[in-house]
Image: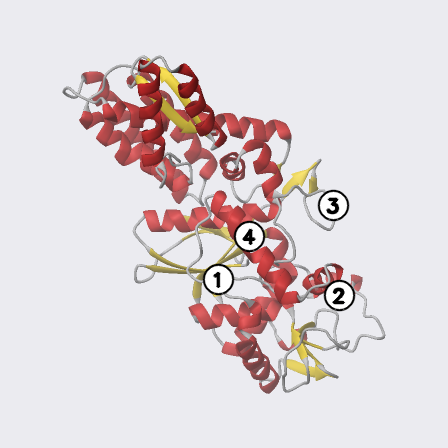
Amino acid sequence: MKLFNTLTRQKEEFVVRNGEVKMYVCGPTVYNYFHIGNARCFVVFDMLRRYLEYRGNKVTFVQNFTDVDDKLIRAAKENSCTVPEIAEKYINEYFTDAHRLGVNDATVHPRATENIDKIIEIVEQLIEKGHAYVSGNDVYFDSQSDSEYGKLSHHNMDELEAGARIDVSEIKKHPFDFALWKGKKEEGEISWTSPWGEGRPGWHIECSAMVNKYLGTDIDIHGGGVDLIFPHHENEIAQSECATGCTLARFWLHNGHINVDNKKMSKSAGNFFLVRDAAGKYGYKAVRFFLLSSHYRSPINYSDDILSQALAAVERLNNCLVNIDFAAKNAQGDLSDREKESISFINSKKQEFIEAMDDDLNTADAIGYLFEMTRDINSVITDQVSAEYIENVKSVYVKLCELLGFGNENADDDVEYIEEMIAKRTEAKKAKNFAEADAIRNELLEKGIILEDTRQGVKWKRA
Protein backbone atom coordinates (compact mmCIF):
# COMPACT_ATOMS: atom_id res chain seq x y z
CA MET A 1 0.00 0.00 0.00
CA LYS A 2 1.22 3.49 -0.85
CA LEU A 3 0.14 6.69 0.90
CA PHE A 4 0.93 10.30 0.11
CA ASN A 5 3.07 11.66 2.93
CA THR A 6 2.69 15.42 3.41
CA LEU A 7 6.05 15.43 5.17
CA THR A 8 7.94 14.23 2.08
CA ARG A 9 5.41 15.39 -0.53
CA GLN A 10 5.37 12.02 -2.26
CA LYS A 11 3.71 8.63 -2.21
CA GLU A 12 5.58 6.17 -0.06
CA GLU A 13 5.24 2.49 0.65
CA PHE A 14 3.30 2.11 3.88
CA VAL A 15 4.82 -0.79 5.78
CA VAL A 16 2.83 -2.08 8.74
CA ARG A 17 5.05 -2.80 11.72
CA ASN A 18 4.29 -5.89 13.83
CA GLY A 19 0.77 -6.16 12.41
CA GLU A 20 -0.44 -3.00 14.16
CA VAL A 21 -1.09 0.54 12.96
CA LYS A 22 -1.10 3.43 15.44
CA MET A 23 -3.13 6.32 14.06
CA TYR A 24 -4.10 9.71 15.48
CA VAL A 25 -6.56 12.07 13.81
CA CYS A 26 -7.49 15.52 15.06
CA GLY A 27 -11.12 15.55 16.15
CA PRO A 28 -13.72 18.31 16.48
CA THR A 29 -13.79 21.39 18.65
CA VAL A 30 -17.12 20.69 20.32
CA TYR A 31 -18.91 24.02 20.44
CA ASN A 32 -21.45 23.33 17.66
CA TYR A 33 -22.73 20.63 15.30
CA PHE A 34 -20.16 19.63 12.71
CA HIS A 35 -20.50 20.61 9.05
CA ILE A 36 -19.78 18.67 5.86
CA GLY A 37 -16.25 20.05 5.68
CA ASN A 38 -15.50 18.59 9.12
CA ALA A 39 -17.24 15.36 8.15
CA ARG A 40 -14.85 14.74 5.26
CA CYS A 41 -12.01 14.26 7.69
CA PHE A 42 -14.04 11.93 9.91
CA VAL A 43 -15.26 9.81 6.98
CA VAL A 44 -11.91 9.66 5.15
CA PHE A 45 -9.96 8.44 8.16
CA ASP A 46 -12.75 6.08 9.16
CA MET A 47 -12.38 4.65 5.66
CA LEU A 48 -8.60 4.34 6.01
CA ARG A 49 -9.01 2.57 9.33
CA ARG A 50 -11.66 0.21 7.92
CA TYR A 51 -9.42 -0.66 4.98
CA LEU A 52 -6.35 -1.29 7.11
CA GLU A 53 -8.43 -3.63 9.26
CA TYR A 54 -9.91 -5.29 6.17
CA ARG A 55 -6.34 -6.06 5.11
CA GLY A 56 -5.81 -7.89 8.40
CA ASN A 57 -4.13 -5.27 10.56
CA LYS A 58 -4.89 -4.25 14.11
CA VAL A 59 -5.53 -0.49 14.24
CA THR A 60 -5.30 1.56 17.41
CA PHE A 61 -7.12 4.72 16.46
CA VAL A 62 -7.21 7.84 18.64
CA GLN A 63 -9.39 10.85 17.83
CA ASN A 64 -9.58 13.66 20.36
CA PHE A 65 -12.21 16.16 21.40
CA THR A 66 -11.08 19.75 21.95
CA ASP A 67 -13.40 20.55 24.84
CA VAL A 68 -11.89 23.83 26.03
CA ASP A 69 -10.86 26.85 23.96
CA ASP A 70 -11.99 30.38 23.10
CA LYS A 71 -14.91 29.14 20.98
CA LEU A 72 -16.32 27.01 23.79
CA ILE A 73 -15.89 29.82 26.31
CA ARG A 74 -17.75 32.17 23.97
CA ALA A 75 -20.53 29.62 23.34
CA ALA A 76 -20.92 29.02 27.09
CA LYS A 77 -21.37 32.75 27.70
CA GLU A 78 -23.90 33.06 24.89
CA ASN A 79 -25.91 30.14 26.26
CA SER A 80 -25.54 31.08 29.96
CA CYS A 81 -24.03 27.73 30.85
CA THR A 82 -20.61 26.22 31.61
CA VAL A 83 -17.92 25.13 29.16
CA PRO A 84 -18.26 21.46 30.24
CA GLU A 85 -22.01 21.62 29.57
CA ILE A 86 -21.45 22.96 26.04
CA ALA A 87 -18.78 20.31 25.42
CA GLU A 88 -20.93 17.45 26.70
CA LYS A 89 -23.88 18.51 24.55
CA TYR A 90 -21.89 18.67 21.33
CA ILE A 91 -19.84 15.55 22.01
CA ASN A 92 -23.15 13.68 22.22
CA GLU A 93 -24.32 15.39 19.02
CA TYR A 94 -21.04 14.42 17.33
CA PHE A 95 -21.68 10.75 18.04
CA THR A 96 -25.26 11.01 16.77
CA ASP A 97 -24.15 12.37 13.39
CA ALA A 98 -20.98 10.29 13.16
CA HIS A 99 -22.77 6.99 13.80
CA ARG A 100 -25.42 7.81 11.20
CA LEU A 101 -22.62 8.61 8.75
CA GLY A 102 -21.22 5.15 9.36
CA VAL A 103 -18.18 6.49 11.22
CA ASN A 104 -17.07 3.94 13.79
CA ASP A 105 -15.97 5.03 17.25
CA ALA A 106 -12.23 5.47 17.71
CA THR A 107 -10.37 3.09 20.00
CA VAL A 108 -10.06 6.05 22.35
CA HIS A 109 -11.78 9.46 22.28
CA PRO A 110 -9.74 11.48 24.81
CA ARG A 111 -10.66 15.01 25.82
CA ALA A 112 -8.25 17.86 26.37
CA THR A 113 -9.63 18.52 29.87
CA GLU A 114 -8.93 14.92 30.89
CA ASN A 115 -5.23 15.30 30.09
CA ILE A 116 -4.18 18.51 31.84
CA ASP A 117 -1.51 16.70 33.90
CA LYS A 118 0.11 15.29 30.77
CA ILE A 119 -0.04 18.68 29.05
CA ILE A 120 1.68 20.37 32.01
CA GLU A 121 4.31 17.62 32.06
CA ILE A 122 5.24 18.22 28.41
CA VAL A 123 5.31 22.01 28.84
CA GLU A 124 7.69 21.57 31.79
CA GLN A 125 9.94 19.35 29.64
CA LEU A 126 10.04 22.00 26.90
CA ILE A 127 10.97 24.74 29.36
CA GLU A 128 13.67 22.56 30.91
CA LYS A 129 15.18 21.80 27.48
CA GLY A 130 15.19 25.45 26.43
CA HIS A 131 12.39 25.15 23.88
CA ALA A 132 9.81 27.23 25.77
CA TYR A 133 9.72 30.31 27.95
CA VAL A 134 7.39 31.82 30.53
CA SER A 135 5.85 35.21 29.78
CA GLY A 136 3.73 36.41 32.70
CA ASN A 137 1.23 33.61 33.31
CA ASP A 138 1.60 32.34 29.75
CA VAL A 139 4.10 29.88 28.32
CA TYR A 140 5.27 30.09 24.70
CA PHE A 141 7.12 27.62 22.49
CA ASP A 142 10.36 29.15 21.18
CA SER A 143 10.12 28.43 17.45
CA GLN A 144 13.70 29.62 16.85
CA SER A 145 15.00 26.88 19.16
CA ASP A 146 13.88 24.23 16.67
CA SER A 147 16.13 24.07 13.60
CA GLU A 148 13.54 21.91 11.76
CA TYR A 149 10.55 24.19 12.36
CA GLY A 150 8.58 24.40 9.10
CA LYS A 151 9.48 20.94 7.75
CA LEU A 152 5.89 19.75 7.41
CA SER A 153 4.32 22.77 5.72
CA HIS A 154 7.38 23.43 3.51
CA HIS A 155 6.73 27.16 3.84
CA ASN A 156 9.42 29.70 3.14
CA MET A 157 9.70 30.79 6.76
CA ASP A 158 11.62 33.99 5.90
CA GLU A 159 8.78 35.14 3.64
CA LEU A 160 6.19 34.25 6.28
CA GLU A 161 8.15 36.14 8.91
CA ALA A 162 8.39 39.23 6.71
CA GLY A 163 4.61 39.29 6.41
CA ALA A 164 3.94 38.62 10.08
CA ARG A 165 3.25 41.22 12.74
CA ILE A 166 3.86 41.25 16.46
CA ASP A 167 1.48 43.37 18.48
CA VAL A 168 3.52 45.46 20.94
CA SER A 169 1.23 44.28 23.73
CA GLU A 170 1.94 40.65 22.99
CA ILE A 171 4.92 39.42 24.96
CA LYS A 172 6.54 36.82 22.78
CA LYS A 173 9.95 36.69 21.17
CA HIS A 174 9.06 35.79 17.59
CA PRO A 175 6.00 35.82 15.31
CA PHE A 176 6.03 32.01 15.04
CA ASP A 177 6.14 31.42 18.78
CA PHE A 178 2.85 29.97 20.00
CA ALA A 179 1.09 29.51 23.32
CA LEU A 180 1.54 26.25 25.19
CA TRP A 181 -0.27 27.53 28.27
CA LYS A 182 -2.65 30.50 28.51
CA GLY A 183 -2.93 32.32 31.82
CA LYS A 184 -6.42 33.01 33.18
CA LYS A 185 -7.63 36.36 31.85
CA GLU A 186 -10.78 37.08 33.88
CA GLU A 187 -12.66 35.93 36.95
CA GLY A 188 -14.91 32.94 36.35
CA GLU A 189 -12.99 31.76 33.29
CA ILE A 190 -12.45 28.00 33.23
CA SER A 191 -8.91 27.23 34.41
CA TRP A 192 -6.57 24.74 36.05
CA THR A 193 -3.71 25.13 38.48
CA SER A 194 -0.23 25.03 36.95
CA PRO A 195 3.34 26.01 37.91
CA TRP A 196 2.72 29.27 35.98
CA GLY A 197 -0.57 30.15 37.66
CA GLU A 198 -4.22 29.47 36.88
CA GLY A 199 -4.86 28.92 33.19
CA ARG A 200 -5.63 26.47 30.40
CA PRO A 201 -3.72 24.71 27.62
CA GLY A 202 -3.07 26.15 24.19
CA TRP A 203 -4.69 24.36 21.26
CA HIS A 204 -1.63 22.65 19.77
CA ILE A 205 -0.23 21.11 22.96
CA GLU A 206 -3.31 19.02 23.71
CA CYS A 207 -2.76 16.79 20.67
CA SER A 208 0.91 16.23 21.52
CA ALA A 209 -0.10 15.18 25.02
CA MET A 210 -2.77 12.77 23.83
CA VAL A 211 -0.62 11.20 21.11
CA ASN A 212 2.12 10.62 23.67
CA LYS A 213 -0.21 9.28 26.36
CA TYR A 214 -2.32 6.92 24.25
CA LEU A 215 0.03 5.93 21.41
CA GLY A 216 3.57 6.74 22.54
CA THR A 217 6.23 8.11 20.18
CA ASP A 218 6.91 7.36 16.51
CA ILE A 219 3.31 6.57 15.61
CA ASP A 220 2.42 5.38 12.12
CA ILE A 221 -0.15 7.88 10.85
CA HIS A 222 -1.21 11.36 11.92
CA GLY A 223 -4.09 12.87 9.97
CA GLY A 224 -6.48 15.75 9.59
CA GLY A 225 -7.75 18.34 7.15
CA VAL A 226 -5.33 20.20 4.88
CA ASP A 227 -6.07 23.41 6.82
CA LEU A 228 -4.32 21.87 9.85
CA ILE A 229 -0.93 21.51 8.17
CA PHE A 230 0.06 25.01 9.25
CA PRO A 231 0.12 26.04 11.98
CA HIS A 232 -1.49 23.22 14.00
CA HIS A 233 0.40 20.18 12.78
CA GLU A 234 3.59 22.14 12.22
CA ASN A 235 3.50 23.26 15.84
CA GLU A 236 2.55 19.81 17.03
CA ILE A 237 5.62 18.27 15.38
CA ALA A 238 7.88 20.95 16.82
CA GLN A 239 6.74 20.69 20.43
CA SER A 240 6.45 16.87 20.42
CA GLU A 241 9.83 16.16 18.88
CA CYS A 242 11.60 18.80 20.95
CA ALA A 243 10.09 17.37 24.14
CA THR A 244 10.68 13.67 23.45
CA GLY A 245 13.61 13.67 21.03
CA CYS A 246 11.63 11.14 18.95
CA THR A 247 9.82 11.27 15.62
CA LEU A 248 6.16 12.10 16.12
CA ALA A 249 4.71 10.25 13.10
CA ARG A 250 6.03 8.38 10.08
CA PHE A 251 3.19 9.45 7.78
CA TRP A 252 1.19 12.69 7.72
CA LEU A 253 -2.06 12.50 5.73
CA HIS A 254 -4.38 15.41 4.94
CA ASN A 255 -7.74 15.49 3.19
CA GLY A 256 -8.67 18.34 0.83
CA HIS A 257 -11.21 21.11 1.36
CA ILE A 258 -14.87 21.09 0.46
CA ASN A 259 -15.73 24.20 -1.53
CA VAL A 260 -18.92 26.14 -2.02
CA ASP A 261 -18.79 28.36 -5.11
CA ASN A 262 -15.04 27.61 -5.28
CA LYS A 263 -14.45 28.95 -1.76
CA LYS A 264 -13.46 26.78 1.19
CA MET A 265 -16.42 25.78 3.34
CA SER A 266 -15.97 27.02 6.92
CA LYS A 267 -17.98 28.23 9.88
CA SER A 268 -16.01 31.47 10.01
CA ALA A 269 -16.91 32.26 6.38
CA GLY A 270 -20.56 31.44 7.01
CA ASN A 271 -20.79 29.25 3.90
CA PHE A 272 -21.11 25.93 5.67
CA PHE A 273 -23.77 23.20 5.65
CA LEU A 274 -24.38 21.10 8.74
CA VAL A 275 -24.24 17.35 8.17
CA ARG A 276 -27.61 16.78 9.79
CA ASP A 277 -29.25 19.39 7.56
CA ALA A 278 -27.84 17.82 4.40
CA ALA A 279 -28.72 14.34 5.70
CA GLY A 280 -32.26 15.48 6.45
CA LYS A 281 -32.68 16.11 2.73
CA TYR A 282 -30.55 13.39 1.15
CA GLY A 283 -29.79 10.86 3.89
CA TYR A 284 -26.55 10.16 5.75
CA LYS A 285 -25.40 7.49 3.30
CA ALA A 286 -25.66 9.95 0.41
CA VAL A 287 -23.49 12.38 2.38
CA ARG A 288 -20.95 9.60 3.03
CA PHE A 289 -21.00 8.64 -0.65
CA PHE A 290 -20.40 12.25 -1.67
CA LEU A 291 -17.40 12.45 0.67
CA LEU A 292 -15.82 9.26 -0.69
CA SER A 293 -16.66 9.72 -4.37
CA SER A 294 -13.57 11.87 -5.00
CA HIS A 295 -9.97 11.21 -4.05
CA TYR A 296 -9.49 12.32 -0.45
CA ARG A 297 -6.69 14.80 -1.29
CA SER A 298 -8.66 16.58 -4.00
CA PRO A 299 -10.91 19.56 -3.23
CA ILE A 300 -14.57 18.83 -3.97
CA ASN A 301 -17.48 21.16 -4.58
CA TYR A 302 -20.71 20.92 -2.62
CA SER A 303 -24.04 21.39 -4.40
CA ASP A 304 -27.59 20.05 -4.34
CA ASP A 305 -27.08 18.45 -7.75
CA ILE A 306 -24.06 16.50 -6.54
CA LEU A 307 -25.88 15.34 -3.40
CA SER A 308 -28.86 14.27 -5.54
CA GLN A 309 -26.51 12.19 -7.68
CA ALA A 310 -24.99 10.67 -4.54
CA LEU A 311 -28.46 9.73 -3.29
CA ALA A 312 -29.28 8.03 -6.60
CA ALA A 313 -25.99 6.11 -6.44
CA VAL A 314 -26.63 4.92 -2.90
CA GLU A 315 -30.12 3.77 -3.90
CA ARG A 316 -28.60 1.69 -6.72
CA LEU A 317 -26.28 -0.04 -4.28
CA ASN A 318 -29.02 -0.54 -1.72
CA ASN A 319 -31.44 -1.94 -4.32
CA CYS A 320 -28.82 -4.48 -5.41
CA LEU A 321 -28.23 -5.51 -1.79
CA VAL A 322 -31.98 -5.87 -1.25
CA ASN A 323 -32.21 -8.02 -4.39
CA ILE A 324 -29.36 -10.21 -3.15
CA ASP A 325 -31.06 -10.75 0.22
CA PHE A 326 -34.36 -11.53 -1.46
CA ALA A 327 -32.78 -13.93 -3.96
CA ALA A 328 -30.99 -15.72 -1.12
CA LYS A 329 -34.35 -16.79 0.35
CA ASN A 330 -35.35 -18.53 -2.88
CA ALA A 331 -31.94 -19.73 -4.08
CA GLN A 332 -31.81 -23.24 -5.56
CA GLY A 333 -30.19 -25.26 -8.29
CA ASP A 334 -26.62 -25.70 -9.48
CA LEU A 335 -24.20 -22.95 -10.47
CA SER A 336 -24.96 -21.92 -14.08
CA ASP A 337 -22.39 -20.92 -16.70
CA ARG A 338 -23.61 -17.31 -16.50
CA GLU A 339 -23.17 -17.37 -12.73
CA LYS A 340 -19.65 -18.74 -13.14
CA GLU A 341 -18.83 -15.88 -15.51
CA SER A 342 -20.25 -13.39 -13.05
CA ILE A 343 -18.22 -14.79 -10.14
CA SER A 344 -15.04 -14.56 -12.23
CA PHE A 345 -15.91 -10.97 -13.19
CA ILE A 346 -16.66 -9.98 -9.59
CA ASN A 347 -13.36 -11.45 -8.37
CA SER A 348 -11.44 -9.55 -11.06
CA LYS A 349 -13.14 -6.30 -10.00
CA LYS A 350 -12.35 -7.07 -6.37
CA GLN A 351 -8.67 -7.18 -7.27
CA GLU A 352 -8.93 -3.85 -9.09
CA PHE A 353 -10.80 -2.45 -6.08
CA ILE A 354 -7.93 -3.47 -3.79
CA GLU A 355 -5.32 -2.05 -6.17
CA ALA A 356 -7.18 1.27 -6.18
CA MET A 357 -7.40 1.37 -2.39
CA ASP A 358 -3.72 0.43 -2.11
CA ASP A 359 -2.92 3.41 -4.34
CA ASP A 360 -3.25 6.16 -1.71
CA LEU A 361 -6.81 5.18 -0.73
CA ASN A 362 -8.34 5.89 -4.14
CA THR A 363 -11.99 5.47 -3.15
CA ALA A 364 -13.19 7.16 -6.33
CA ASP A 365 -11.86 4.36 -8.57
CA ALA A 366 -12.79 1.69 -6.00
CA ILE A 367 -16.43 2.85 -6.03
CA GLY A 368 -16.36 2.72 -9.84
CA TYR A 369 -15.37 -0.96 -9.71
CA LEU A 370 -18.13 -1.59 -7.18
CA PHE A 371 -20.71 -0.23 -9.63
CA GLU A 372 -19.35 -2.46 -12.38
CA MET A 373 -20.05 -5.38 -10.05
CA THR A 374 -23.50 -3.97 -9.32
CA ARG A 375 -24.47 -3.94 -13.00
CA ASP A 376 -23.26 -7.49 -13.51
CA ILE A 377 -24.99 -8.87 -10.41
CA ASN A 378 -28.26 -7.17 -11.31
CA SER A 379 -28.13 -8.82 -14.75
CA VAL A 380 -27.83 -12.26 -13.13
CA ILE A 381 -30.25 -12.20 -10.22
CA THR A 382 -33.27 -11.19 -12.27
CA ASP A 383 -33.95 -14.94 -12.57
CA GLN A 384 -33.56 -17.89 -10.21
CA VAL A 385 -30.03 -18.17 -8.85
CA SER A 386 -28.08 -20.83 -6.99
CA ALA A 387 -27.12 -20.71 -3.33
CA GLU A 388 -23.47 -21.04 -4.35
CA TYR A 389 -23.73 -17.88 -6.48
CA ILE A 390 -25.31 -15.94 -3.61
CA GLU A 391 -22.59 -17.16 -1.26
CA ASN A 392 -19.88 -15.89 -3.62
CA VAL A 393 -21.62 -12.56 -4.13
CA LYS A 394 -21.97 -12.05 -0.39
CA SER A 395 -18.32 -12.91 0.26
CA VAL A 396 -17.09 -10.26 -2.19
CA TYR A 397 -19.65 -7.64 -3.22
CA VAL A 398 -21.58 -7.37 0.05
CA LYS A 399 -18.36 -7.25 2.09
CA LEU A 400 -16.95 -4.46 -0.08
CA CYS A 401 -20.19 -2.48 0.29
CA GLU A 402 -19.93 -2.92 4.06
CA LEU A 403 -16.25 -1.92 3.96
CA LEU A 404 -17.15 1.39 2.28
CA GLY A 405 -19.97 1.95 4.77
CA PHE A 406 -22.79 1.19 2.33
CA GLY A 407 -23.92 -2.14 3.75
CA ASN A 408 -27.54 -3.23 3.71
CA GLU A 409 -29.31 -1.38 6.52
CA ASN A 410 -31.86 -4.16 6.64
CA ALA A 411 -29.41 -6.08 8.79
CA ASP A 412 -30.33 -4.43 12.05
CA ASP A 413 -32.02 -5.22 15.35
CA ASP A 414 -35.61 -4.66 14.19
CA VAL A 415 -35.58 -7.09 11.25
CA GLU A 416 -37.62 -9.61 13.21
CA TYR A 417 -40.29 -6.98 13.92
CA ILE A 418 -40.40 -5.86 10.28
CA GLU A 419 -40.70 -9.41 8.99
CA GLU A 420 -43.46 -10.07 11.53
CA MET A 421 -45.38 -6.99 10.34
CA ILE A 422 -44.99 -8.06 6.70
CA ALA A 423 -46.38 -11.50 7.58
CA LYS A 424 -49.38 -9.89 9.31
CA ARG A 425 -49.97 -7.67 6.29
CA THR A 426 -49.84 -10.71 3.99
CA GLU A 427 -52.44 -12.51 6.13
CA ALA A 428 -54.61 -9.38 6.17
CA LYS A 429 -54.52 -9.20 2.36
CA LYS A 430 -55.41 -12.90 2.06
CA ALA A 431 -58.40 -12.21 4.32
CA LYS A 432 -59.28 -9.20 2.08
CA ASN A 433 -58.80 -6.91 5.08
CA PHE A 434 -57.18 -4.23 2.95
CA ALA A 435 -57.68 -1.48 5.53
CA GLU A 436 -55.49 -3.38 8.00
CA ALA A 437 -52.96 -4.16 5.29
CA ASP A 438 -52.73 -0.48 4.37
CA ALA A 439 -52.44 0.48 8.04
CA ILE A 440 -49.47 -1.88 8.46
CA ARG A 441 -47.79 -0.48 5.34
CA ASN A 442 -48.29 3.08 6.61
CA GLU A 443 -46.99 2.19 10.06
CA LEU A 444 -43.80 0.78 8.55
CA LEU A 445 -43.48 3.76 6.22
CA GLU A 446 -43.57 6.09 9.23
CA LYS A 447 -40.60 4.14 10.59
CA GLY A 448 -38.76 4.63 7.30
CA ILE A 449 -39.51 1.16 5.87
CA ILE A 450 -40.63 0.93 2.24
CA LEU A 451 -42.46 -2.20 1.07
CA GLU A 452 -42.47 -3.40 -2.53
CA ASP A 453 -44.90 -6.08 -3.66
CA THR A 454 -43.39 -8.36 -6.32
CA ARG A 455 -44.46 -11.62 -7.95
CA GLN A 456 -41.89 -13.42 -5.80
CA GLY A 457 -43.07 -11.82 -2.56
CA VAL A 458 -42.60 -8.64 -0.53
CA LYS A 459 -39.27 -6.82 -0.58
CA TRP A 460 -38.45 -4.07 1.90
CA LYS A 461 -35.81 -1.42 2.34
CA ARG A 462 -35.16 1.71 4.33
CA ALA A 463 -36.14 5.08 2.92
Whole-angstrom CA distance, mark 3 to mark 2, is 29 Å
| Sequence-first disc among 4 and 1 | 4
Of the numbered discs in the image, which one, if any, rests on residue 94?
4
Along the horizontal axis of the image, is 343 left or right of 109? left
Whole-angstrom CA distance, mark 4 to mark 1, is 12 Å
Whole-angstrom CA distance, mark 3 to mark 4, is 20 Å
Of the numbered discs in the image, which one, if any, rests on residue 270?
3
Above or below, 15 relative to 39: below
Task: Kindly state the secondary structure of the residue where label 4 is placed.
Answer: helix
- The label nearer to you, 4 versus 1, is 4
Toward which corner of the image does residue 155 lie, by quadrant? bottom right
- Image coords of residue 190 (percent x, y): 68, 73
| Sequence-first disc among 1 and 2 | 1
Amino acid under disc 3: Gly
Task: Kindly state the secondary structure of the residue where label 2 is placed.
Answer: helix
Give the residue at mark 1.
109
Whole-angstrom CA distance, mark 4 to mark 2, is 37 Å
Mark 4, residues whose alpha carbon is within 10 Å: few (<14), some, or many (≥20)? Answer: some
